[in-house]
Amino acid sequence: MDRRYLVKIHATTGFLGFFFILSFWLSTLISELFMSYETIAMVKQSILYAFIFFIPTMIIAGMSGSKLSVKVKHPNVLAKKKRMPFIVINGLIILLPSAFYLSYLASLGRFGSTFYIVQGIELIVGAANLTLMGLNIRDGLGIRRRKRAV
C-alpha cells in the first residue's frame, strides 16, 4: 500500500476516533446536566450502538499508525507512540466497561451513587483520553507541516 494512502487513512480514522469520543463525552455531560433520566438512558444506549463504528475506526487508526511508525525516529512520532498505551488502556480497561455498565444501570433506572461515581470516573478518563488524542493529532499535524516545509 502506498504510504501516502496509509497516512490519509490514519489521519482520517484518528480524527474520527477523536470526534467519536468527544461526542460521547459531550452528549453524556449535556444529558446528565440538563435532561431527563429517560434521555440519559437513551444517550447511554446510543453510545453502545455507536461502538459498531467507533471500535473498527480505532482499530484501523492504531494499525495504520503502528505500520507508519516502524523504524521512525521523529520526536513527534516517538511522543505519539508513548501516549498510545495510555489511550488504549484507558479505553479498554475503564471506558468500554464503564459504557456498558452505565447503559445497563440506566436501562434499569438505577441512577444512584454507583451510577454517578462510575459516570464521574468515565468523564475524567474520557477527558484524559481526549487530551492525549488531541496531543497526538497536534503532533501528527506537526509532522505533516514539517514535511511540507522541507
Image (cartoon, rainbow, N blue to C red):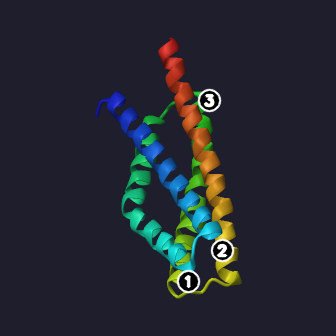
> Residue at horizontal 49%, vertical 32%?
71
Amino acid at circle 3? Pro
Task: Measure how far apart labels 1 and 2 are at the Cα level.
Answer: 10 Å
Whether residue 77 is visible to the viewer of this picture, yes or no, is no
The first of marks 3 and 2 along the sequence is: 3
Report x, y in % for residue 48. Answer: 44, 69
> Residue at horizontal 66%, vertical 53%?
128
Residue receiving disc 2:
118
Foreground: disc 3 or disc 1: 1
Residues 127 and 28: in front is 28
Task: Measure how far apart labels 3 and 1 are at the Cα level.
Answer: 44 Å
> Dot 1 surroundings within 10 Å: few (below 14), some, or many (20 or more)?
some
> Residue at horizontal 59%, vertical 42%?
134
Task: Measure how far apart labels 3 and 2 are at the Cα level.
Answer: 36 Å
Report x, y in % for residue 19. Answer: 49, 49
Residue receiving disc 1:
105
Classify residue 116 as left or right of residue 24: right
| Vertical placement of residue 41 versus 34, above or below | below
Whether residue 109 is visible to the viewer of this picture, yes or no, is yes
Confirm or deny contact between disc 1 and disc 2 (CB under 8 A). Answer: yes
Query: Which label is found at residue 75?
Result: 3
